[in-house]
Image (spheres, rainbow, N blue to C red):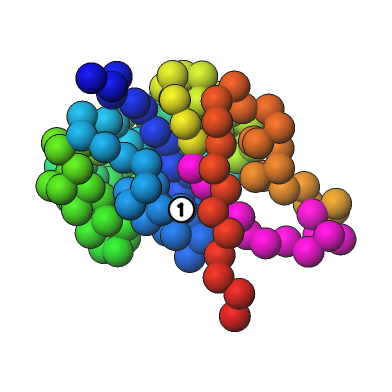
Amino acid sequence: MEKARTVGVGMDYSSTSKAALRWAAENLIGGGDRIILIQVQPPNADHTRRQLFGGTGSPLVPLAEFREINFSKQYGLTYDPEVLDILDAVSRTKGQAEVAAKVYWGDPREKLIDAVEDLKLDSLVMGSRGLGAIKRVLLGSVSNYVVTNAPCPVTVVKGSKP
């Protein structure tokens, strides 16, 4: 019997991060696995929880609490029905897979690496914004940084071309 895995999915609620979540749900998550939605807020985000959990990130927020708008807002999570539908389907159809979310505050590149280590992720899945070469050099690519520095396998899901 395979060991249950912990899979993180970087979520900024863009179409590519939602595609990454769908890909993980369809191709990676199995019975007994744990999927953790990882959201990184900007370091200057004006949110009361940032003062409490800025260094370590929020506590894990179970799916049942993430579904409730007021509770998810307390942690700075974005309420997105499409994402919740995907997570609900995972929890129902993937052999009781455990679903949770966690919020970090800071640079997404650094905080996604922190999440891999803090949550002891077996794998991380994230979307690619598809920056052009010039923007990637000027702004830096979160996915390139994470692929290079993460101590676990990272899957980058590309968005569809218009």
Q: Taking 27 as reference, is 4 above or below it?
A: above
Q: Taking 118 as reference, is 16 above or below it?
A: below
Q: Can you give x and y, in whole percent of width and height, for residue 150 in the image?
A: 61, 27
Q: Can you give x and y, in whole percent of width and height, for residue 161 in the image?
A: 61, 74
Q: Can you give x and y, in whole percent of width and height, for residue 159 in the image?
A: 56, 65
Q: Residue at x 85, y 53 (%)?
A: 138
Specify whether 66 is left or right of 51: left
Q: Residue at x 23, y 19 (%)?
A: 1
- Disc 1 marks a residue whose amino acid type is Ala
Q: Is residue 130 magenta?
A: yes
Q: Can you give x and y, in whole percent of width and height, for residue 95 in the image?
A: 15, 38
Q: Residue at x 67, y 62 (%)?
A: 130
Q: Is residue 55 visible?
A: no
Towards the viewer: 87 or 47: 87
Q: Which residues are drawn in magenta?
A: 125-136
Q: Callout 1: few (<14), some (14-19), or many (20+) C-alpha neighbours within 10 Å?
A: many
Residue that numbered label 1 is attached to: 20
Q: Residue at x 59, y 80 (%)?
A: 162
Specify whether 97 is left or right of 21: left
Specify whether 15 is left or right of 128: left
